[in-house]
Image (cartoon, grey):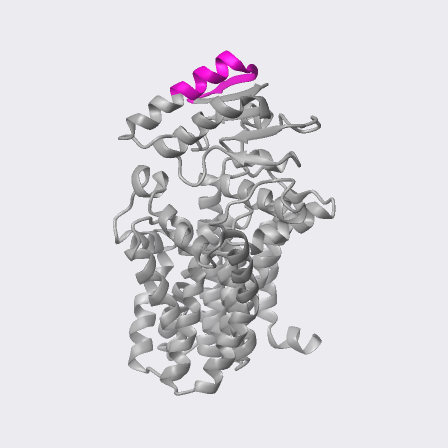
Amino acid sequence: MRQYFQKNKQFIILLFVVFLVHLIFLPGFHELWWDSGVYVGMGKHLFSAGSSGLWEHIRPPVLPAMLGFFSFLGLDVIIAGRILELLFSLGAVVLFYHITKYYFNEKTALLSSAIFSFSSIFFYLSFHLYTEIPALFFVLLAVYFFAVKRYYFSGFAAALAFLTKFPAGMFLPILLIVLLLNKELKNSLKLCTGFLVPVLPVLVAYQIFHGNALLPFIEARETILQVLGCNVLRFKPWWQYIYWIVSENGLHLFAIVGLIAFFAKFKKKKLLPLLCLAGPLIYFSYQHCRDYRYLALFIPFVAMFSGFGIDYFIEKLNTHKKQVFVLVLLIVLGFSVFKGVLFYIGNENRETNPVAEEYFKFLEGRSVSKEVWSSNPVISFYTDAKINKIYYPVYNAGVSADFYEYLLENAEDIQYVFLDNCGGGIICSPDDSVCEEKNKKIKNFLDNNFEKVYDAQFGRCFYLVYEN
């Protein structure tokens, strides 16, 4: 350990800065997002054999299992989850540094790490219980094991990335392409074996519980094409990721120089970083649903070439290279910290919505003996009751009609119904008039047959809780 610190002094200082900046913002208020509520609910479902929480079969199981384990131990899942995200973030930075050092050099690794560590989306998501940071950690772990020729462990890590965020599974074929181009069939088999070890039990479980081992992947694909947010309300053009890369940190423009220098002295050994950048960029640009969060899976490899581009200019100097490098590194780090923190401050909701807080916590400490139906999964943070989903998988005329019919036939089995129009759970597509009509019928039925025990408004949002 002492030898490692001596050899990587500058990186240890950089890592300490990363930790310190995270520590400054970690204790503050961080809004609980929709997906986080799903993952916590799924975790409770797993560790209670289905008697608690909720289940969404189109979601990957790794992060829910981790959060469920914290809940099972009686820990505060919000605090434990954020500490876990911090550890994954720091681990990703360490892995990234060593990968870049292997494929390029130490100076490029330091410059790239300074850029990547405070990537706006990477820094922002590290305070929320989302899958991007853990998935990226496992992706980088897979690349690291690949670089040091531990192919079985590389495949295993790639599988964990896939089971944390399904699109991260694309890194397995990327790793395979490199091996097959080098005609390393035996190592390809090791890689695939490592991948299958954690994936096969999950596929078997899917087959048992869903009757089709591939059903969650198929329906996840179908669902993402119907999501109202990224497909309609916040639809982005095909070139959006290029724009996000540049706007996230202007230093990414140096990636162009880095790529030119890379191709000028191309070596087959360095093919993997290029594929890890190009593969996800092309894939996500091709998808109709383009979300800023997806940038997190390949932004490290953009930063890698950005750092290489900056280092290329430094190496062109005739004198004072060491002094110039230190100065440039400090400037790069300072600018990256500024950009990352500025994005966080501009996008993080640092004020609580008191109405939403009361709404989500309504079941906290209350006895639940019958069914709970909710249009928002965030309530799973505050109750161990089983949550039935009104919104799942995509709220439309069919789903709203199904819930309305269920209300008519099974009202006596329901104890609570949670409705709000802020999280997106019962928001209909603008052209879905049938869905809107069903919403009116649902609300009228609840108004006439249930007691309204919570009714509040905050801005454009209403929050309603009905008790039977």
Query: Which of 46 and 28 lies nearest the eye of the viewer?
Result: 46
For the C terminus, the quadrant is: top right
Q: Residue at x 70, y 75 (%)?
A: 2
Q: Residue at x 34, y 24 (%)?
A: 436
Q: Where is residue 15 in the image (x, y as percent from the top left)?
A: 59, 62
- The answer to which image quadrant residue 361 occupies is top right
Q: Position of residue 99 (x, y in %)?
A: 50, 73
For the N terminus, the quadrant is: bottom right
459 falls in the magenta region: yes
Query: Which of 324 and 30 lies nearest the eye of the viewer?
Result: 30
Q: Position of residue 206 (x, y in %)?
A: 52, 56
- From this view, report whether residue 202 is shown above or below residue 372: below
Name the side, left or right, on which 52 lies relative to 157. Answer: right
376 falls in the magenta region: no
Q: Residue furthest right?
A: 74
- The answer to which image quadrant residue 4 occupies is bottom right
Residue 98 in sight: no
Q: Where is residue 142 in the image (x, y as percent from the top left)?
A: 51, 71
Name the side, left or right, on which 425 lies relative to 232. Answer: right
Residue 116 in sight: yes
Q: What stretch is highlighted in magenta?
A: 440-460
Q: Which residue is drawn at 44% across and 54% down?
A: 215
Query: Which of 354 and 402 lies nearest the eye of the viewer?
Result: 402
Q: Residue furthest top?
A: 448
- From this view, report whether residue 98 is shown above or below residue 336: below
Q: Residue at x 54, y 56 (%)?
A: 208
Q: How many labels does the image show?
A: 0
Q: Which residue lies furthest to the front in this view?
A: 409
- From this view, report whether residue 378 is shown above or below residue 409: below
Name the side, left or right, on which 269 lies relative to 209. Answer: left
